[in-house]
Amino acid sequence: MNNLIMILSIVAIGILTVFLNRKVKNKSRMSMILAIVFVLYIATFMIIGMFKN
């Protein structure tokens, strides 16, 4: 179950990256948005892990 969630989220991040690449002209802003998304994603996984334990 955990692996499935991980694979789905990686695919979602990939799709989001491609979408932002087409949408956003300013590349530095795009990388900043991606960094924020990635940090939130890691934080979510840490919180889920804490609740499971």
Image: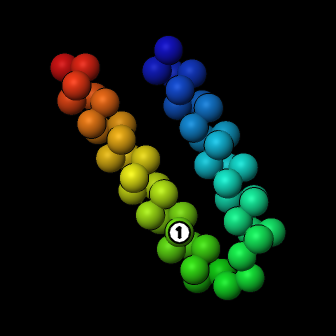
- Colour mapping: rainbow
Q: Give the total of numbered labels.
A: 1
Q: Residue at x 54, y 64 (%)?
A: 34
Instruction: Please give the residue where the numbered disc 1 appears in the rendered image.
Output: 33
Pinpoint residue 16: horizontal percent, then vertical percent: 67, 54
Up-down: is 43 above or below 28?
Answer: above
Q: Residue at x 52, y 22 (%)?
A: 3
Up-down: is 9 above or below 5?
Answer: below
Pinpoint residue 2: horizontal percent, then vertical percent: 46, 21
Query: In the visual, does 16 lie left or right of 33?
Result: right
Q: Residue at x 38, y 46 (%)?
A: 42
Pinpoint residue 38: horizontal percent, then vertical percent: 46, 55
Residue positioned most to the front: 23
Residue positioned most to the top: 1
Query: In the visual, does 52 lie left or right of 44?
Result: left
Q: Quadrant of residue 49?
A: top left
Up-down: is 25 above or below 52?
Answer: below
Residue positioned most to the right: 22
Q: Specify few, some or many for label 1: CA neighbours under 10 Å numbering under 14, 14-19, or 20 or more.
A: few
Q: Secondary structure at mark 1?
A: helix
Up-down: is 10 above or below 3?
Answer: below
Pinpoint residue 31: horizontal percent, then vertical percent: 56, 73
Image quadrant where one finds the C terminus: top left
Query: In the visual, does 43 lie left or right of 32?
Result: left
Q: Residue at x 53, y 69 (%)?
A: 33
Q: Quadrant of residue 39?
A: bottom left
